[in-house]
Amino acid sequence: MFRFATALCYFVTFFVLLCCAQRFEPFQDPIYGDFGLVDLDSPQHPHSACLTLKFHARLYNFNLNNTPIAAIDVADFTSQQVRLNGYCALANEVKRTAQLHASWKSSGGRKRLMKFKFREGQLHEVRRHEQQEIRWMLEEVVYSEQYKGQSVSFSSLSPPYESQVNVSYSPPPPTIHAPLNQKFVCKDRLNISLHNPKYKKTVLELLPEIDVQPMNPASGFGSNSKTTSVLKYKLDKCESLFSLSL
């Protein structure tokens, strides 16, 4: 009897999860440069955008032999050659998270994957013009590549190559964040260092115009976007916060 009740409980749980699973679909708008995810099951706005991003990107690899640095153009995220997937934050979540994954193949046959991980929370360090409030933030960026059966990953949260193994490492605070109902907009380049303890760093450079809203975006996107609440950083603020010394 106990086994039957346990099996029935598992079946009901699986059935509920299966029926109530939220469905998300990628969108890519090459005209306006937007990309992200659409919530197919939103009760308020079905088929509405639930995660919207807009930027171009470039990678700087410090690991190539005989060259101090090499720039790798990242694929256009609005192109159909790039496969997008992920999930959006749900309104009833206690701790809201969202992720967008982009995968593509380069001309040399390398498989590349970029993950953008967002979460809701409070910043440990608050700048002068900001208040201690619940915000969305870009928690982690992960870049991976696969070639001839080998793979390597770099993360914005991993300890750098230069750090000692026996020394505790604290990752840097989030570089991109805003209040929950606002988007982050910057008209300058932003740079995020990605690390692997066994290799020199790789730097992800986001190119303007940068427009990020992973939670609570407007119902539309591209030409249909109606977002009115925007958090903008001035040009000198972007440069001072996220400049890259090559």
Image (spheres, rainbow, N blue to C red):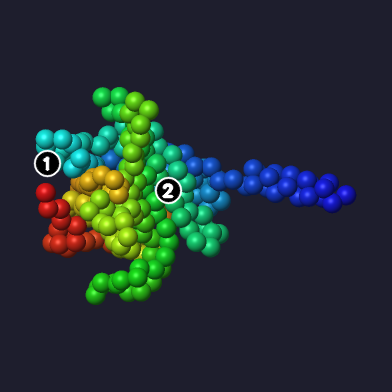
- Image-quadrant location for residue 148: top left
SS at mark 2 in the image? strand
Q: Identify the residue at horizontal 30%, vertical 62% (top origin).
A: 167
In the picture of the structure, the residue carrying the numbered disc 1 is: 68
Q: Around disc 1, counting alpha carbons within 10 Å, would you say few (fewer than 14), some (14 to 19), or many (20 or more)?
A: few
- Residue 110 got which mark? none
Find the residue positioned furthest to the front: 166
Camera-nearest label, 2 or 1: 1
Up-down relation of residue 214 to residue 150 (above or below): below
Q: Identify the residue at horizontal 11%, vertical 37% (top origin).
A: 67
In the picture of the structure, the residue carrying the numbered disc 2 is: 99
**Sequence-wise first label, 2 or 1:** 1
Up-down relation of residue 137 to residue 68 (above or below): below
Q: Position of residue 96 (x, y in %)?
A: 48, 58
Q: Identify the residue at horizontal 83%, vertical 46% (top origin).
A: 4
Of 236 and 67, nearer the camera is 67
Could you give the CA–CA distance between mark 2 and mark 1, rounded to whole angstroms? 32 Å
Name the amino acid type tagged 1.
Answer: Pro
Q: Position of residue 10 (x, y in %)?
A: 73, 47
- Image-quadrant location for residue 75: top left
Name the amino acid type tagged 2.
Answer: Gln
Up-down relation of residue 71 to residue 201 (above or below): above
SS at mark 1 in the image? loop
Of 149 and 207, nearer the camera is 149
